[in-house]
Image: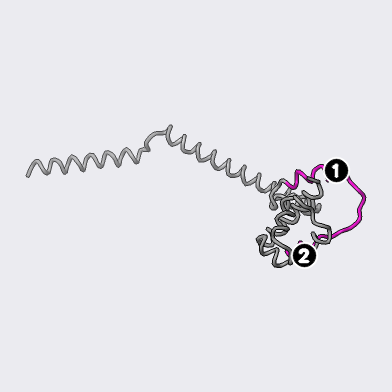
Amino acid sequence: MREDTVRSAAILREARLRAGYSQDELARASGKDRTVIARYEQGIVAPSLDTLVQLLRACGFDLPLELVAHDPGPDETSSAIQMLSPERRLDRMLELRRTPEEDHVLEEQRRRLREAQQRGEEIERKREETLRRIEERGPRLEDERELEERRRRFEDAHRGRKDN
C-alpha cells in the first residue's frame, strides 16, 4: 500500500466521521458509490486529488493546497500522528500554535495550582497535628466532670428504684 493512499484514506475517513456521515450518507452527498468510498477509506485505492477534494467538500471541509519546500521531518512523524485519535491530534496542533502570551498564562495557572496544592497540604498537616495533640492529651477535664455527673445521676436513680 502506498503512503499517499494511507494519507488520503485517513483524511477522508476523519472528514466523514467529523461530519457525522456514514459511508452511505457520504455517497449520497457526493454522488459516488458507497463501495468506492469504502475502498478509498480502506486504502485499497487512492482517489485522485480532485476526487479527494470533492469528497472532503461534501463533508463540509476543504483541503487547502499550496506548494512548499519538501521537509522530510514531518513525514517521519506524520505516521505517528495519524495513529492518534482526532482529539489528540487537535490537542497536539493547539499546543504547537501557542503564543508567548498563552505560554505566560499557562505558566501562571500552573504556579497557582502548585500554590493551592501546597496550601492544601499545609492545612492537612495542621489538621493531623491537631488530632495527634488531642489524642496525646487524653480526655479533657470537662469530659471527666460530665462523666462523673452522669455516674452520680445513674447511682441516684438506681438507689431510688431500690427504695420503692
Q: Position of residue 26 (x, y in %)?
A: 70, 63
Answer above or below: position of 70 versus 136: below
Residue 66: name its quadrant. bottom right
Mark 1 or 2, closer to the camera: 2
Q: Which residue is mark 2?
A: 57
Q: Which residue is mark 1?
A: 73
Residue 68 makes an appearance in the image: yes
| Closer-to-camera residue (147/87) | 87
Q: Which residues are magenta?
A: 55-82
Residue 11 included in the magenta stretch of the image:
no
Q: Position of residue 160 (x, y in %)?
A: 12, 43
Identified at 82% across, 42% down, the residue is 76
Label 2: how many residues lie within 10 Å, few (<14), some (14-19) or many (20+)?
some
Would residue 40 appear left or right of 145 to someone viewing this image? right
Residue lying furthest top: 136
Would residue 30 appear left or right of 146 to someone viewing this image? right
Identified at 54% across, 41% down, the residue is 124
Looking at the rendered structure, the kind of residue marked 2 is Arg
Residue 130 image label: none
Answer above or below: position of 56 versus 94: below
Identified at 75% across, 52% down, the residue is 9
Where, quadrant-wise, is the N terminus in this rendering? Answer: top right
Residue lying furthest left: 164
Looking at the rendered structure, the kind of residue marked 1 is Gly
Spatial CA span between label 1 and label 2: 29 Å
Residue 104 makes an appearance in the image: no
